[in-house]
Amino acid sequence: MKHLEFIKDKYGFELLMDAYQFEKNPKLFFISDYHTTNFYEIMFFKKGDGRIEIHDQTIPIQDNSLFFFSPGQPKRCFIKTTSVIGFHLVFQNEFLGHFFSDKLFTYRLQYFHTITKPFHLYLSQHTFSFLSTLLHEVLLEIKDYKKDSEHILRSLLYYMLIRCNREYSLQNDISYSVEGNYKAYEFKKLIETHITKLNKVKEYANLMDVSRVYLNNIVKKQYGITASTMVANRLLLEIKSRLLHTTQDIAEIAYDLNISEPNNLTRFFKSHTGLSPNQFRNSYPFDRNVN
């Protein structure tokens, strides 16, 4: 599977964010093979026709829609490039994390690193137009970069991320606060980092030096689900990704994910999806990209 790296010095100086207009060079953004990145992305579609496939979901493009992608998420895009209008906003976590001394900031946003919630957001024409104005400001600031431009760009990005988080949370009836328990966000990040090796809540509790009861309480308060459910959902997503994007057999996947027996993986997967791993794999088209 193709993996795209962020180019930090493409303008002759280091900048950990960038923005583009789709209509200027649409082939640059819409890759029809599954791929991953090491940066965050938001696609803003003012006009668009097509679909985006991410993990095991297929989402149609609509006018005034946004799509959110986190590093490492496999996706591919089938978009009619002749009629698409919009923006592509990309950045690395360090662009905000270093400045705010908060390496978990992106984990506070509801739409990044989501497991069970949508990867997209539909906006009113008014709200989309407002965000488009800010994106034009980003483009102009990058084009005419000055010594203080990084501060302006960071402020614009921060505002857009928070505004999108509010809209996303309202549409999905979840909290838009980014001031929750730091340990809950840390847990979310640790799952993303260690899910291939750690799949038990007690292992994460030990890693964080907290009790299982405390961890479960803060996770349930922050996300509305138990810590074990959060781990199970993320493990399920990882298994699906291996089934769809690799040629590994069940035994190899179980070994890679530190699951004691292939039969345990099969039972876990079937209890959550109603399908065996092979049934799930065979239910998808054969043109999927695999390693």
Image (spheres, grey):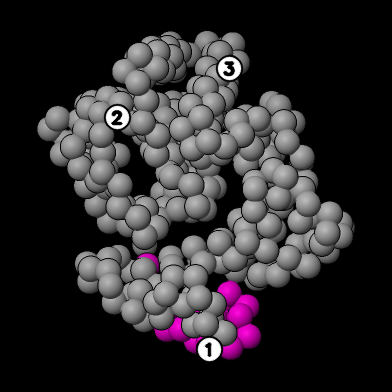
Q: Say if 206 sits above or below 46 in the image.
A: below
Tag 2 near tag 3, CB within 8 Å: no
What range is drawn magenta here? 245-263
Q: Which mark is residue 45?
A: 2
Residue 187, how many percent across, how many down?
71, 52
For the residue marked with disc 3, what is the amino acid?
Ser
Image quadrant where one finds the C terminus: bottom left
Q: Is residue 265 left or right of residue 118?
A: right
Which of the two discs, 1 and 2, labels the residue nearer the N terminus? 2
- The amino acid pointed to by label 1 is Asn
Q: Of the numbered discs in the image, which one, if any, rests on residue 263?
A: 1
Cα separation between marks 2 and 3 = 22 Å
Quadrant location, the N terminus: bottom left
Helix or strand or loop: what does disc 3 sit on? helix
Mark 3 or 1, closer to the camera: 1
9 w.r.t. 275: above or below? above
Considering the numbered disc 1 on the image, is that residue within a helix, a strand or a loop? helix
**Camera-nearest residue between 52 and 201:** 201
Q: Nearer the viewer, mark 1 or mark 2?
A: 1
Pointer 3 residue: 155
Q: Quick check: 167 above or below 70?
A: above
- Write the residue at 40% across / 13% down: 130
N-term mark: 2 or 3: 2
Query: Residue 33: x, y in percent?
Result: 27, 56
Q: Is residue 186 magenta?
A: no
Look at 64% across and 37% down and name the residue there.
108
Marks 1 and 2, how far apart at CA: 43 Å
* Residue at screen point 54% across, 77% down: 268
Name the side, left or right, on which 60 lies relative to 36: left
270 relative to 25, above or below: below
In the image shown, does 186 or 268 lie closer to the viewer? Answer: 268
Coordinates of residue 98 in the picture (x, y in percent): 69, 31
